[in-house]
Amino acid sequence: MSTPNAVLDRDALLRLRWAGVAVLGAVLGAGTLGWLPASAPLTAAGVLVSAIALNLVLARVGERATGPVLLGDTALLTWMLAGSGGVSNPFTLLYLFPVLLASLVLSPAWSAGLGAATTCCFAGLYFTSPAHHHMEMSQHLVGMVVAYGLTVPLLAGAVHRFRTAAALAETEARLAREARAVSERLTSLAALAGGAAHELATPLTTILLIARELERTATGPDREELVALGLEVESCREILDQLAVEAGTGAGESASTVDLATFTREAVAAHEARVQAEPVDVCLPVRLVGQALRRLVGNARDATGPAGEVVLRAARSGGQVVFEVEDDGPGMPPEVLARCCEPFFTTKPSGQGRGLGLFFVHSLAEQLDGTLELTSTVGSGTLARLTLPGGAPCASS
């Protein structure tokens, strides 16, 4: 029943209502002593017992009962006021409390409904109090009803605007905390990547060279194991390069002139993708762009499975190189598409993805003054468009 940006939770509302019951008991007691306008003893007792019962209902049923309980409060208040002076009772201002509580914890529709209900009850007290209808008093009482009817929507509207502002501020604070946490993690990764790349690059290269040399002469199961070893070493090197790019230190690779068609085919030779590329000379940092293409094609293949189709297109467009990776997989819903380039965000099962692939490509595109655009429709596949500068041969070539 309560809305997501409610200012009070159920426990806070219950504590507030129990405090209200205590105040109500004090007011009814003061009336019994003749200090305030008093209801009949049975009416006072009935109102107090009913208020306690409503609190117990709210405690047991939960938030679903909030609206009906506040309507019950309005009925009890009308019952009490009708027996203790009617519209002239100074405690008619208590009608504001159900509306205020509804504005704090319920939807605008509920607030409007309670506002209308309390205004009708307030006006009803006027018509059930004929003893006060002489000229001067009648105008005063009508003025009270009208003033109440004007105050309620202003009060409810102000509270709802406050709730909206508070919810927005909380959302912004949460996003800022998440961004700060990601930034701290990336800072740690930067330090780790720098040290790891320096310490591990040479031994990994040596291991890879030895594995490739042994692979040439090995046969049978030994050769398969050496191939697997080489692939794992290459994966380790790519992870180090990936972390370096994400930390902002990996885009310093020198660009070189390559044939776009040859480069594109060789970059994804180990992946199942249909390549359509123009045979033109372009200027690119081939190692990093090759990694980016493998990330995009690999993600597309994971989405489609072995039976799906993945197409990689590469073309020169003016002074830019445009790569498009399109698949016929299940696509991504808008909420996933909006977050898929965030670091550490992944929809893959635990252990099958680090959530860094698309973030790597996005980071590389930004560092090279390019762009990465993703479009996806659920049930119709996904298109990733990577646009990079370098649509002409390198100046030194």
Image (tube, rainbow, N blue to C red):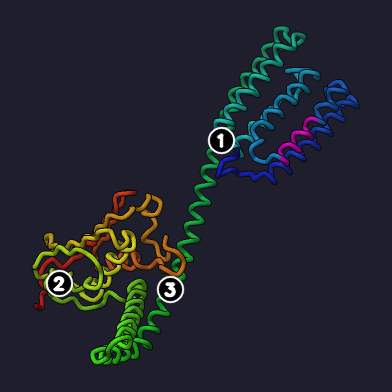
Mark 3 element type? helix
Label 3 sits on residue: 187
| Label pair 1/3, CB-CB below 8 angstroms | no
Q: Inspect the image, locate mark 1, and give the three-letter code of the amino acid beneath it.
A: Ser
Label 2 sits on residue: 283
Classify mark 1: residues with Cα within 10 Å, few (<14), some (14-19) or many (20+).
some
In the rendered view, tell whether residue 276 sits above or below residue 49: below
Percent of width and height locating residue 372: 27, 60
Quarter of the N terminus within the rendering: top right
Q: Inspect the image, locate mark 3, and give the three-letter code of the amino acid beneath it.
A: Thr
Residue 96: quarter of image: top right
Q: Residue lying at the far front in this picture: please name it.
A: 220
Determine the CA span between mark 2 and mark 1.
58 Å
Q: Inspect the image, locate mark 2, and give the three-letter code of the amino acid beneath it.
A: Cys
Which residue does the image show at 36% across and 54% down from the upper left?
Answer: 337
In the rendered view, tell whether residue 376 sits above or below residue 87: below
Which residue does the image show at 52% across and 42% down from the upper left?
Answer: 164
Determine the CA span between mark 2 and mark 3.
31 Å
Quarter of the C terminus within the rendering: bottom left
